[in-house]
Amino acid sequence: MLNTRIILSGLWVAVMLTYLWGDVLTIFAGDMKPGEMGGVKVTQPMLFGIGVLMLTPILMFVLTLTLPYPAIRWVNIIVAIFWIIFNLISLSGYPAYNKFLLSVSVIFNAITVWYAWKWLG
């Protein structure tokens, strides 16, 4: 069986690619107006916040491979639960293809919580 660190890191890569695919489809579908998000003018602080949010799956990939156990176990659980809640709250404002992809990311995050929870070092 694969090491739990590798499985968790792979799940974070899957989450990151799911978000990226959603962004690509949004651009190609024409559902995005440059300089706006959901009809709201994009500001530098908004972009910074989005950048921080979207960096977390990448950061979790690296931290899962490098932070010591048991700290990384709890970081995986907490961050994955945050993303589950965040995605479920924002699910309603998206077109069907993004709802599907966000639902898939929720599943990936739930699997992350499950693997981290049962991880015994």
Image: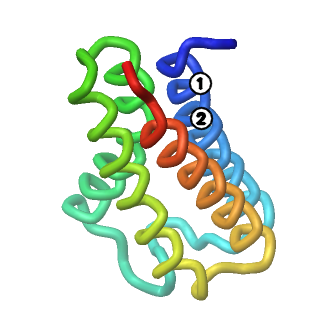
Query: In the depicted view, which residue is nearer to us: 121 or 65?
Result: 121
- Seen at 48% across and 19% down, the residue is 5
State left or right for residue 118 relative to residue 70: right
Q: Which dot, 1 or 2, sits closer to the camera?
A: 1
Which dot marks residue 11?
A: 2
Name the image quarter holding the N terminus: top right
Query: Which element is circle 1 on?
Result: helix
Query: In the depicted view, which residue is nearer to us: 27 or 5?
Result: 5
Name the image quarter holding residue 104: bottom right
Q: Which residue is mark 1?
A: 7
Which of the colour schemes (rainbow, by chain, secondary structure, one colour) is used? rainbow
Proximity of marks 1 and 2: CB atoms separated by less than 8 Å: yes
Query: In the depicted view, which residue is nearer to us: 120 or 7?
Result: 120
Type of amino acid under label 1:
Ile
State left or right for residue 91 relative to residue 56: right
How far across and how far down the image is residue 91, in percent?
A: 58, 79
How far across and how far down the image is residue 62, in percent?
A: 38, 19
- Seen at 64% across and 79% down, the residue is 94
Q: Residues within 10 Å of mark 2 (few under 14, many from 20)?
A: many
In the rendered view, tell whether residue 82 sits above or below residue 95.
above
Type of amino acid under label 2:
Leu
User: How far is mark 1 from mark 2, CA to CA?
Assistant: 6 Å
